Image (tube, grey):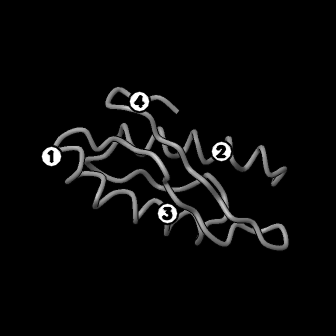
């Protein structure tokens, strides 16, 4: 999903109909600020995805654009995997 600062793409692993892993395989890293924000935000988003098992996760404060792009990409991955 495209964001103001660059694309965000999420890949999920599904086992027995449940999300067992989530990885942001693309996200903004073009400058130091992006790198700093996303080094903190991406692991939180990935952990919340596995814990929730859905795209209904909390945004990370200070990483609104990345969070929004992550959730949209996550929902797309969930749809492609034919989960709920």
Disc 2: which residue: 75
Q: How many marks?
A: 4
Badge 4 vs badge 1, beta-carbon distance below 8 Å: no
Q: Is disc 1 placed on a helix, strand or loop?
A: helix
Disc 2 to disc 4, how far (Cα)? 15 Å
Residue 8 spot, x, y in % from top left? 47, 40
Sequence-wise, the earlier of marks 1 and 2 is: 1
Q: Is disc 3 placed on a helix, strand or loop?
A: helix
Farthest residue, direction left: 32
Residue 84 spot, x, y in % from top left? 81, 53
Residue at x-position 78% and y-position 44%:
80
Nearer the observer, disc 1 or disc 3? 1
Residue 11 spot, x, y in % from top left? 61, 54
Sequence-wise, the earlier of marks 1 and 3 is: 1
Q: Is disc 2 placed on a helix, strand or loop?
A: helix
Label drawn at residue 46 = 3
Task: Report crowding for label 2: few under 14, some 14 to 19, many 20 or more residues within 10 A (C-alpha).
Answer: some
Disc 1 to disc 3, how far (Cα)? 21 Å
Label drawn at residue 3 = 4
Badge 1 vs badge 3, beta-carbon distance below 8 Å: no
Disc 1: which residue: 32
């Amino acid at each position: 999903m495209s964001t103001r600062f660059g694309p965000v793409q999420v890949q999920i692993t599904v086992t027995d109909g449940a999300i067992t892993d989530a990885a942001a395989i693309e996200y903004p890293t073009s400058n130091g600020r992006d790198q700093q924000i996303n080094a903190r935000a991406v692991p939180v988003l990935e952990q919340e995805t596995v814990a929730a098992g859905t795209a209904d996760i909390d945004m990370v404060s200070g990483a609104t654009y990345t969070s929004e792009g992550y959730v949209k990409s996550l929902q797309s991955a969930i749809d492609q995997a034919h989960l709920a």
